[in-house]
Amino acid sequence: MLRVLLTHNPEDLEVYYGRALAELEPLAEVVRNTVGRDLTPGELIEAAGDCDVIVSHRATPGPRALFESTPRLLAFLRCAVDIRDVDVDAASRAGVLVATAEKSFVPSTAELALALMLDLARNVTTSTTDYRSGSEPRQRPGRQLRGATVGIIGVGAIGSYLAGLLASIGMRVLAHDPYVDVTATGIEQVSLEALLAGSDFVLPLAAATAETERLIGPAELAQMRPGALLVNVSRGDLLDEDAVAAALDSGHLGGLAMDVGMAPDQRPSPHLAARPGVVATPHLGGLTPENADAQARSSVEQIRAILSGEIPPRAVNADAATRLREYWATGEGRR
């Protein structure tokens, strides 16, 4: 029977595998993370030493040393989509398959973006904090989304879904993406400069790459409308956080809402999240029962595929999966 290591800490294991674990356990011998927190690279290597498959939480990296130190490992299945911290080249050299989860987080992340926009626009958190401190909040004027202009940078799965959602409530939607031709009705494709200058809300939703690192920096912030609101639910790498802090201090940036940042597990950086004018949540975009369950079940689907002698769905290096092919050829005889 396959031995499968689930790297999720106890809290995340319950969130993601509360129901899917019952489907996984009949298929494989499940080894759990027993340290009560996210595993360090050394702890991961030790825990995975006698396992065939790793099902990895997003906070568990896949470093080169892991693939070089686990000769039994067949597959590294990320229960998320982001694999920037997985050394796929090292996995391929070792013959280990790498695969990702389904993109089931799109509606939940888009809905959180809308929630953060509304919170920031209507001073929800600020008023709530005043009440909880025993103060009577002043009646701060809010901003109406209907009739306002939103700029979406990156029209991928989340960007296109959110664009449709915001257009449906009466917002003017500007979009910028040099790699996508936007054809959806009601969405205007413009240059980045036009988007920044014309938007009341700016949402960077581009993929995090070397090209998009610090996509929103001093020059881009200066091009934004005075008082515009910035909302980031994508990746912390997209913002130059020092420049954003300076724009908040000067008053040029009207507010910031963030679900991601440069802290561990891609959470908002505490020094920025604690500032006045900032609304922050701890990387909750995909953290709904619907998404968590779908991503966990997608790893179960991948285990079933391995047991059936098939390359799992969403594999990123199928051609390099030599250990899996050997496993299928020899079965338990290779042990």
Image: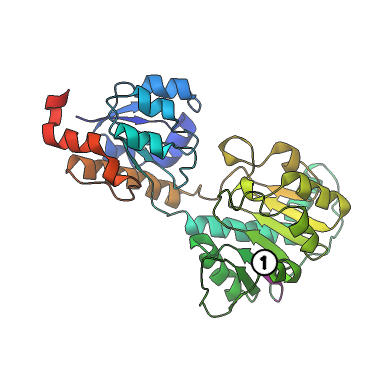
Q: Which residues are magenta?
A: 147-151
Q: Give above or below for 242 relative to 65.
A: below
Of residues 263 and 17, the one nearer the viewer is 263
Q: Nearer the viewer, residue 232 or 68?
A: 68
Identify the residue at horizontal 75%, vertical 69% (top origin). 197
Q: Quadrant of the N terminus?
A: top left
Say if residue 27 shows up in the picture. Answer: no
For mark 1, give the secondary structure: helix
Residue 334 drawn at (x, y percent): 15, 25
Tell me the crowding category of disc 1: few under 14, some 14 to 19, or many 20 or more residues within 10 angstroms, Cα based. Answer: some
> Looking at numbered disc 1 in the image, what kind of residue is underneath it?
Leu
Q: Residue at horizontal 82%, vertical 51%?
A: 248
Q: Quadrant of residue 192?
A: bottom right
- For this orientation, the residue located farthest to the bottom is 185
Q: Quadrant of the C terminus?
A: top left
Q: Residue at x 57, y 69 (%)?
A: 163
Classify 42 as above or below 103: above
Image quadrant where residue 121 sits: bottom right
Question: Viewer-proximal residue, 114 or 151?
Answer: 151
Q: Position of residue 48 (x, y in %)?
A: 35, 24
> Which residue matches tag 1?
192
Q: Nearer the viewer, residue 72 or 280?
A: 72
Looking at the image, is 264 positioned above or below residue 177?
Answer: above
